[in-house]
Amino acid sequence: MQNYVCYIFDKNYMRHGAASIVSLIDNNRELDLEIFALTIDVSAADMALVSGIGNEKQKVTVIDISEYKKDFDNIEKSWSLGAYARLIIHKILPEYVKKVLYIDCDTVVIDSLSDLFDTDMEGHTVAAVIDKLLPCGVKESLGIGAGTPYINSGVLLVDLIKWRDKKVGEKCIQFLEENAGANNIPDQNAINYVLKDDIKLISLRYNVDGLTAYMPYSDAKELFTQNVEDFYPADDYEESRKNPVIIHFIGFYLAKPWQYGNLHLYSNKYEEYAGQTPFGFKLEEKKLKGDPISKWIRKTAKKSIEKAIHNQNYGKFAGIYKRSEDILHFGSSIKKAVRKFI
């Protein structure tokens, strides 16, 4: 049976997306795959190199989607088109694609996806993993109750028939047009708001972030923003740490394995697969973003996090990260509010 996968990346993330595609193919050689690489501002030569990663059984189809920028003209954009474009994959992908697995390009796939493709959606439009790292107050601001999962949009199994019929993409865009303040996590907030009663949870193994890779369940259920215990049993969480399927390079400072001094537990997996792409593996300097106060907070937190990891004090590690991110999120909200009156 043919299975469909979708990536979206621009020229800045092209080589990372290529590494993820290589990892996907390497660990799923038994599956018939068509992998769609939706690209933005990527040269024709590089698009050809990405297409060449595929083979007869695992085909890579590259589609330039730069023309779709106009779909988001009325949105106050704080992210690149790549972050928003997953909302309109129903317009871009061929009609014969009935179900698709969307995967962020800052990932590697290190085991078979066979069971995930066979997932019974049970009538839901989307299947995904909860986002344990969202800033405090996000669920409440979207009207999502504590007992309802808020999912991470980095790995989405999508029933495209239902997505099209329910006009999910159009509703998400409308939400973003009417809620400029929701753009700190743009597509993700929109998807969770529109589909809050229409999401099936899948195993944590299919979207393992940097903190989960380090942290035992005893710490996780206390420190993550969404209480893991509300949605997943301990054995599923621990299995995701021991036998992850998709590694997602998010979760804390220097979680990206292509950055100097990165701290991700699985950075070697990215290096392995990036080295097999036409673009090779390359380290780049991490530059802290934001105003001087934000940079100081991140720099101070980074030093404390490195010490906590060295001492294997993962509870402290998560606590430092969470407090610093909450402070930065609060500061960002204040700045946005002030701008409205200037």
Image (cartoon, rainbow, N blue to C red):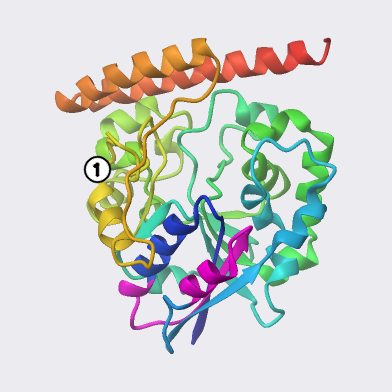
The residue that label 1 is drawn on is 265
- Which residue occupies the extreme left position in the image? 311
- Residue 268: percent from the left, percent from the top? 23, 51
**Residue 79 lies in what quarter of the image?**
top right
Image spot of residue 297 (x, y percent): 43, 13
The quadrant holding residue 342 is top right
Q: Can residue 312 be seen at all in this image of the molecule? A: no
Looking at numbered disc 1 in the image, what kind of residue is underneath it?
Leu
Q: Is residue 52 above or below residue 65?
A: below
- Total numbered badges shown on the rendered structure: 1
**The magenta stretch spans residue 41:** yes
User: Who is closer to the viewer here, 96 or 75?
Assistant: 75
- Can you tell which quarter of the image residue 206 is in? bottom left
Residue placed most toward the observer, 87 or 36: 36
> Would residue 226 be counted in the magenta stretch?
no
Residue 138 placement, left or right of 293: right
| 50 versus 330 height, above or below | below
Q: Is residue 251 above or below residue 59?
A: above
Magenta residue span? 25-51
Where does the image place residue 26, in percent across and percent down from the top left? Answer: 31, 73
Residue found at x 57% / y 41%: 150
Q: Position of residue 184 (x, y in %)?
A: 63, 32
Crowd class of label 1 (few under 14; some 14 to 19; many from 20; radius 10 Å): some
